[in-house]
Image (spheres, coloured by chain):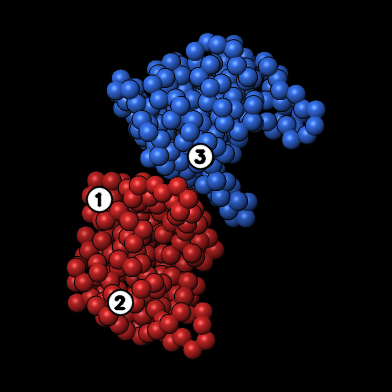
Chain colours: A blue, B red
C-alpha cells in the first residue's frame, strides 16, 4: 500500500462514489469521513453535551456507515475492517475502503475531541502503515483566507508548523500537530476532480495544497 | 432478564434519556432505534438505491450510535455489546443498553429490508433471550386510524394476525409476522410517560396496546 486517502464526508454521496470508481487499481486505501451523520452528532452534542468519548466513538461509527455506503455503490470498491483484508483487496484489483471502528477500538491512539476528526484518524493510520497521505475534500486545497470570499488564494505549499496558527481550514485543527509529531507530509486536493488525486499519486503535477510536516 | 425494551429513536434525545433514567434497576435490557440517523440513510437510499444489505447493516450501526449516546447521558445506564455484559450490568444495578451490531453480525437472522427495523430486531433478541417484549414509542400505542386525526381510538388489545392487515402503524410492518412466527406477545407504550412502562413490567394496569402473537 502506497497511499492512505481520506475521502471527505462532504463529498458523499455522488462525488465520493465517483471518486472511488476512478481510484480502483491505484494501490491506495480509502478512509471516509462521517459526513452528515457526524454533523448530526455535533448538533445533538451542542444541545446535550455528550462526553468526549461518546462523541468520538459514535463519530467513528459514522465513518463506518459512509464507508459501507460508498463501497456498496462504487464498482470495484470493497469495505474492509482490517489491514490484511485491505491488502488482499488491492492484490485482487479492488479498492479497499477501511471501516476504522474496529482498529480504533483496540488502538485508541488519539485525543477524544471534536478537534480530532477523520483527517487525524487517517493520518494516524497512514503513519501506522508507512504510506503517503492524501486528504480529499470539496475545495481545491487550503486557501490564504476564507475560500468563499473573493480574492482568496490557493496555497501551493505550506509547512505544518505555519498551518498551526491558521485556525479553521479545510482540514481539521489537530492535523498539523499530528503531521509534525509523525514527521509526515500531506496533500489536500479537490475530490470533485479525481484526476488531480491520480496525478499526485503518479507523481505528476496537479492542483493541490502540499503540507510539509518534515 | 425479564424484559427486552425497544426504545424508539423518535424519543431521542431527551425523552429517551429520561426513560432510561426511570428504568434503572428494572431487570430489563434496552435496545434503541436508529432515530434520525437511520432516517438519513432512508433519505439517501431513496435517491441512490443502496443494496438491502448496505441499508440493513448501516441502519444497525445507527442503533449502536443512539444506544451509546443515550447510555452516555442516562445515569445508571451502560452500553453493552453482549448478553453476558447485559446480565452483569443488571446484577450490578445498572440498566444495560444493548448495541446490537456485533450480535447481528454473527447471527444475521432477519430479512435485509426496510420492513425489518429495530422493532423486529428487538423481537428477535427477546425470543433469543426468552424475555417479554415492550415497544416504547412516541404515541400511546396502536390506533384504529391515523393517530394525528380526530377520533382515532387507541386499541387496547389486538391479535398479531389482525395487525398483519393494518399497513403502516407505530410498529414496523414485519413485526406482527415475527410475533406470530415466534409465538410472542408484545406491548406498545408511550415512552414520554415512563411510569406506564414500569406499570406494565410490574403487572399493573396502564395505557398501552397489547399485541397477542400466541
Name the secondary structure under disc 2.
Answer: loop
Residue depicted at x 43% and y 87%: B153
Q: CA distance from mark 2 to mark 3?
A: 38 Å
Name the secondary structure under disc 3.
Answer: helix
Q: List the residue tagged with mark 1.
A: B108
- Locate residue A100: give its quadrant: top left
**Image coords of residue A151 (percent x, y):** 80, 27
Q: Nearer the viewer, mark 2 or mark 1?
A: 2
Q: List the residue tagged with mark 2.
A: B165
Q: Counting other residues with Cα less than 10 Å from the Cα at mark 1, is it few (<14), some (14-19), or many (20 or more)? A: few
Q: Name the subunit of mark 1.
A: B
**Image coords of residue A33 (percent x, y):** 51, 36
Residue A162 falls left or right of residue A28: right
Residue depicted at x 28% and y 50%: B104
Q: Are marks 2 and 1 in contact (CB under 8 Å)?
A: no
Q: Counting other residues with Cα less than 10 Å from the Cα at mark 2, is it few (<14), some (14-19), or many (20 or more)? A: few
Q: Name the subunit of mark 3.
A: A
Q: Are marks 2 and 3 in contact (CB under 8 Å)?
A: no
Have a look at marks 2 and 3 and say if they share a chain.
no
Residue depicted at x 41% and y 49%: B49
**Which disc is residue A188 wearing?**
none
**Which disc is residue A14 wearing?**
3
Which of the two residues, B25 or B122, is positioned nearer the viewer here? B122
- Locate residue B97: give its quadrant: bottom left
Name the secondary structure under disc 1.
Answer: loop
Q: CA distance from mark 3 to mark 1?
A: 29 Å
* Whether residue A136 is situated above or below residue B210 in the rendered picture: above
* Numbered circles on residues, count: 3
* Whether residue A179 is situated above or below residue B202 in the rendered picture: above
Q: Nearer the viewer, mark 2 or mark 3?
A: 3
Amino acid at each position: 500500500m502506497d497511499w492512505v486517502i481520506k475521502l471527505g464526508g462532504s463529498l458523499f454521496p455522488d462525488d465520493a462514489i465517483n471518486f472511488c470508481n476512478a481510484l480502483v487499481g491505484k494501490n491506495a486505501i480509502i478512509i471516509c469521513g462521517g459526513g452528515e451523520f457526524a454533523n448530526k452528532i455535533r448538533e445533538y452534542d451542542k444541545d446535550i453535551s455528550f462526553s468526549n468519548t461518546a462523541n468520538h466513538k459514535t463519530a467513528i461509527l459514522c465513518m463506518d456507515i459512509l464507508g459501507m455506503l460508498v463501497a456498496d455503490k462504487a464498482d470495484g470498491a470493497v469495505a474492509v475492517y482490517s489491514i490484511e483484508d485491505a491488502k488482499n483487496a488491492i492484490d485482487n484489483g479492488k479498492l479497499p475502503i477501511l471501516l476504522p471502528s474496529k482498529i480504533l477500538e483496540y488502538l485508541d491512539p488519539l485525543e477524544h475531541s471534536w478537534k480530532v476528526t477523520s483527517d487525524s484518524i487517517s493520518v494516524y493510520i497512514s503513519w501506522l502503515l508507512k504510506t503517503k497521505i492524501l486528504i480529499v475534500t470539496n475545495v481545491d486545497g487550503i486557501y490564504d483566507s476564507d475560500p468563499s470570499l473573493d480574492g482568496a488564494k490557493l496555497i501551493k505549499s505550506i509547512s505544518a508548523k505555519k498551518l498551526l496558527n491558521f485556525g479553521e481550514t479545510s482540514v481539521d485543527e489537530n492535523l498539523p500537530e499530528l503531521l509534525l509529531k509523525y514527521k509526515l507530509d500531506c496533500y489536500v486536493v479537490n475530490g470533485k476532480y479525481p484526476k488531480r488525486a491520480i496525478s499526485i499519486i503518479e507523481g505528476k503535477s496537479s492542483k493541490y495544497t502540499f503540507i510539509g510536516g518534515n
